[in-house]
Image (spheres, rainbow, N blue to C red):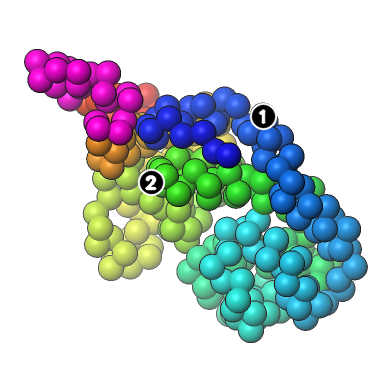
């Protein structure tokens, strides 16, 4: 069961400091433990895309692991994803805006003869790790989407090599959009211009530095609390709102946290 402190800032900080314990606890849950055991015992038995997609339990586990659970029933679509040539920029998967599909196709590239010799697939340990992290994030997202977004960004930050990776992942982009107050209509401009805007705000190379990523996410969590979590259910803000005479303190404290310059 996920622990929620009623504040994105507090809950995120708890999980980023106690991630190993959280993963161990999640893995020990009976249903999760059984699903992991089934995946490990059967993933090496499937040799083709059709066999993989046709095994409901195995396929659903994988789809959940990569944050694609809402597409688990779109089997024909996912077969096109898995059968795409990853080296061909015009292939089906490479034309999709959401990078999660490309990540999924790479993870199970061993099932596609076209990709088998050019792409390194994910190991069973990799997929189980993704599943556990995704399960925790999804559970937390039921009460606080900000925590879900922050943990997802932290988990994927080191894989981001270009602003295009951020623009191609709705969850990653939402974090960056929130931190840098990017306009809602930015998606209407040319993708190259979008990249230039993101690059002007964020040095993507900084995402290889865990300390800088954490600083970015601390700022995100504070902004998310101030704009999405009310003082009524946010213990962090409530500390500053025990009386009307202290309301200005809350505003000042929140502003000082949000105003921290990223990278400075």
Note whether 118 is above or below 166 in the view shown. below
Note whether 64 is above or below 223 in the view shown. below
Q: To which residue does mark 2 refer? A: 176
Name the residue: 54% across, 38% down: 2
- In the picture, the quarter occupied by the N terminus is top right
Horizontal side, residue 210 vs residue 241: left or right: right
Q: To which residue does mark 1 refer? A: 21
Most extreme residue toward the left is 245
Name the residue: 58% across, 64% down: 69
First in residue order: circle 1 vs circle 2:
1
Most extreme residue toward the bottom is 76
Q: Secondary structure at mark 1?
A: helix
The answer to whether residue 108 shows anywhere in this view is: yes
Tell me the distance, in whole angstroms, between the alpha carbons under discs 1 and 2: 28 Å
Residue 6 at x, y percent in the picture: 38, 33
Q: Secondary structure at mark 2?
A: helix
Residue 257 at x, y percent in the picture: 30, 24
Horizontal side, residue 156 vs residue 224: left or right: right
Note whether 261 is above or below 69 in the view shown. above
Residue 30 at x, y percent in the picture: 74, 46
Horizontal side, residue 54 vs residue 256: left or right: right
Magenta residue span: 231-251
Q: Is residue 237 magenta?
A: yes
């Amino acid at each position: 069961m996920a622990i929620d402190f009623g504040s994105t800032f507090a809950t995120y900080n708890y999980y980023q400091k106690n991630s190993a314990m959280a993963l161990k606890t999640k893995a020990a849950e009976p249903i999760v433990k059984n699903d992991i055991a089934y995946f490990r015992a059967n993933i090496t038995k499937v040799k083709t895309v059709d066999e993989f997609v046709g095994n409901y339990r195995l396929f659903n586990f994988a789809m959940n692991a990569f944050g694609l659970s809402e597409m688990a029933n779109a089997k024909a679509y996912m077969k096109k994803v898995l059968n795409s040539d990853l080296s061909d920029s015009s292939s089906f998967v490479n034309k999709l805006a959401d990078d999660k599909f490309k990540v999924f196709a790479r993870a199970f590239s061993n099932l596609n003869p076209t990709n088998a010799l050019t792409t390194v697939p994910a190991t069973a340990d990799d997929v189980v790790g993704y599943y556990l992290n995704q399960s925790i994030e999804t559970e937390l997202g039921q009460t606080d989407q900000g925590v879900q977004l922050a943990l997802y960004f932290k988990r994927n930050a080191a894989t981001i090599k270009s602003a295009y990776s951020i623009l191609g992942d709705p969850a990653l982009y939402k974090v960056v959009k929130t931190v840098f107050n990017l306009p809602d209509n930015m998606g209407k401009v040319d993708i190259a211009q979008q990249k230039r805007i993101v690059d002007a705000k964020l040095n993507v190379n900084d995402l290889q530095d865990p300390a800088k990523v954490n600083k970015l996410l601390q700022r995100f969590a504070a902004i998310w609390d101030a704009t999405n979590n009310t003082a009524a259910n946010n213990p962090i803000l409530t500390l500053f709102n025990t009386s009307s005479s202290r309301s200005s303190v809350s505003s000042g404290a929140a502003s000082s946290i949000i105003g921290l310059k990223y990278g400075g």
